[in-house]
Amino acid sequence: QVRLVESGGGLVQPGGSLRLSCAASGIVFNFYAMDWYRQAPGKQRELVAAITSGGSTNYVDSVKGRFTISRDNAKNTVYLQMNSLKAEDTAVYYCNANRVMGYREYDYWGQGTQVTVSS
């Protein structure tokens, strides 16, 4: 059974920092690309940051220079370090694990963790 469990969300003031974690089980973690998505109320889910199995990273423009995605394959965990948080970063953040093997696609989601940026 595949499980992705996010943690680290909460309430933070503008300009503050949070680190999200996503612990994976039931998959061969180092074979998977890992992504962080977010969904704000009334908006579509958007890809925030991605890291490939080889460690290459990519970010949506709105978080470049503020967020850092990283992975620890020994701990089967992906992180999202969020600095200089803004009110518009408020959303539910979801972890996603994905890989393509031949003609099959594998795609798994966590349950989400709430991040609220407010004074």
Image (cartoon, rainbow, N blue to C red):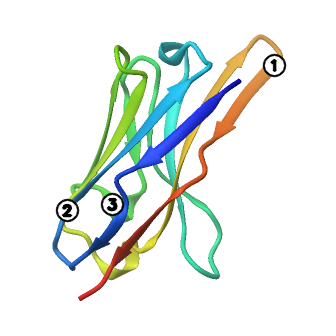
Position above or below: 34 against 44 = above
Q: Amino acid at mark 1?
A: Arg
Q: Which residue is mark 3?
A: 63
Cα distance, mark 2 to mark 3? 13 Å
Q: Which residue is mark 2?
A: 17
Circles 1, 2 touching at the beta carbon (< 8 Å)? no
Percent across and percent down for residue 94 are: 54, 52
- The reply, left or right, for residue 52 in relation to residue 43 is left
Q: Which residue is mark 1?
A: 104
Q: Residue at x 41, y 74 (%)?
A: 90
Q: Amino acid at mark 3?
A: Val
Position above or below: 101 against 113 = above
N-terminal-most mark, 2 or 3: 2
Q: Amino acid at mark 2?
A: Ser
Q: Nearest to the eye among marks 2 and 3: give it.
A: 2
N-terminal-most mark, 1 or 3: 3
Q: Is residue 97 visible?
A: no
Image quadrant occupied by the C terminus: bottom left
- The reply, left or right, for residue 106 in relation to residue 12 is right
Cα distance, mark 1 to mark 2? 38 Å
- The reply, left or right, for residue 1 in relation to residue 18 is right
